[in-house]
Image (tube, rainbow, N blue to C red):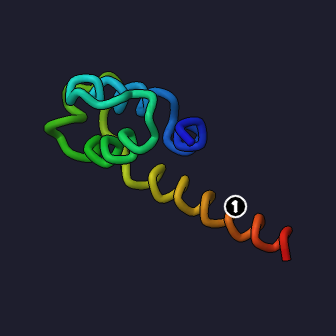
Amino acid sequence: LITLASYNVGRGHILDAREIALKKGLDPNSWSDLKEILPLLSYSKYYKNSEYGYCRGDEPVKYVKRILAYYDILKREAIG
């Protein structure tokens, strides 16, 4: 899931989010933690201290959510 988010927002912003996660004591390798951190990169408090700067961090979260929803539809259709 992190790879999908990286495809959407770029590797650099994922690295920034992972760094923030570490500072907050969260798991930088956990999608459930990163999906909470990524939206923070749209706030100057976070992006001004990040290497790759501002990003619309809610977009990769929505992107991954839509892919997972579509994947669930495909799984249901394959069974039926």
Quarter of the picture holding the N terminus: top right
Of residues 9 and 69, the one drawn nearer to the viewer in this rendering: 69
Q: Left of 75 or right of it: where is 22?
A: left
Question: x%, y% of residue 31?
Answer: 46, 40
Q: Residue at x 76, y 64 (%)?
A: 75
Could you tell whether 5 is left or right of 80 in the image?
A: left
Give me the residue at 20% from left, 30% from top: 24
Task: Give the quadrant of residue 4.
Answer: top right
The residue that appears at 47% across and 59% down in the rendered structure is: 62
Residue 10: percent from the left, percent from the top?
51, 35
Label 1, residues with CA under 10 Å away: few <14, some 14-19, many ≥20? few
Query: x and y percent of residue 55 in the render?
Result: 36, 43
How many labels, in total?
1
Nearest to the observer: residue 31 or residue 57? 31
Q: Is residue 66 above or below residue 12?
A: below
Residue 33 vertical placement versus 75 (above, below): above
Query: Residue at 45% of width from left, 28% of height from top?
Result: 29
Circle 1 sits on which residue? 71
**Looking at numbered disc 1 in the image, what kind of residue is underneath it?**
Tyr
For this orientation, the residue located farthest to the left is 45
Residue lying furthest front? 79
Q: Is residue 32 left or right of residue 10?
A: left
